[in-house]
Amino acid sequence: MADSSKGMEHPTSWYCRFYNSVREAPINVPLLIISCVLFYKLGFLVRRLSGEEPHFSDDDDQEVDLQPLRQDFTVRELRKYDGTRADGRILVAIIFNIYDVSRSVHYYGRNGVNPNYAGRDISRILINSPEYLNDSEDFDDLSDLSTNQMNTLREWEQQYKQKYPFVGKLKEKLQINDTDEEDLELQQADPLVDQI
């Protein structure tokens, strides 16, 4: 019975065999490393020659050829800039500042990671979670936020300010300029003159 157990070999795992081969012939480790580096370089060279450049950046911004926009918006007007317009422009607001994020369609576009952010004030979403997505067209003055929450929003806004072009301010109502007010006063005064 002792003879039969000596003749049978126990199956060993791959890492045991690898360890034994390294222990028996230590030259195998440098050979393995050199062959891995060569295969990597060869793959890189083949991709480069075929015109397929490897993309190592997580910044997938696309170049969008849109004229710079400089305008203040109300919440209702901002909602129109969700990427569905003919020009494809996407705007978001953070702490009452509006940024053009059109070049990040992969984040804010219809098939992007956060398509519901497009055309909205995303201040509360950035400090809370997507469940706070506000579907109303009411202006949010953010007055109930704590100091820590406002600091977090300022950090987010700083990132957007560095990455995306500033468009304008988010307003509760658009203000009528002085010339429009004078025209309105004249129009209202005219019917009174006719009656006298």
Image: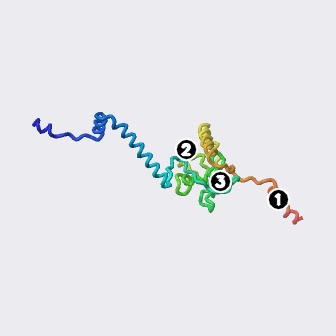
Q: Secondary structure at mark 3?
A: helix
Q: Secondary structure at mark 2?
A: loop
Q: Nearer the viewer, residue 183 or 90?
A: 90
Left or right, residue 30 beside residue 112: left
Left or right, residue 71 beside residue 127: right
* Pointer 3 local density, CA inside 10 Å: few below 14, some 14–19, many at least 20: many
Q: Position of residue 93 (x, y in %)?
A: 63, 49
Q: Are marks 2 and 3 in contact (CB under 8 Å)?
A: no
Q: Secondary structure at mark 1?
A: helix
Q: Kindly identify the residue that appears in the image at 43 percent across and 46 percent down.
A: 40
Q: Kindly identify the residue that appears in the image at 48 percent across and 55 percent down.
A: 50
Quarter that holds the N terminus: top left
Q: Kindly identify the residue that appears in the image at 49 percent across and 51 percent down.
A: 48
Q: Nearer the viewer, residue 45 or 61?
A: 45
Q: Position of residue 188 (x, y in %)?
A: 82, 60
* Pointer 2 local density, CA inside 10 Å: few below 14, some 14–19, many at least 20: few
Please name the residue that numbered disc 3 is placed on: 75
Disc number for residue 128:
2
Tell me which amino acid carries mark 3.
Answer: Val
Q: How far is the residue under mark 1 from the one under mark 2?
A: 45 Å
Disc number for residue 138:
none
Outermost residue toward the left in this view = 1
Q: How far is the residue under mark 3 from the one under mark 1?
A: 26 Å
Tell me which amino acid carries mark 1.
Answer: Asp
Q: Considering only order in the chain, which callout, 3 or 2, is on the residue closer to the N terminus? A: 3
Please say which color scheme the image uses: rainbow
Quarter-of-image position of residue 69? bottom right
Please name the residue that numbered disc 1 is placed on: 183
Q: Considering only order in the chain, which callout, 1 or 3, is on the residue closer to the N terminus? A: 3
Tell me which amino acid carries mark 2.
Answer: Asn
Q: Position of residue 38 (x, y in %)?
A: 41, 44
Outermost residue toward the bottom in this view = 194
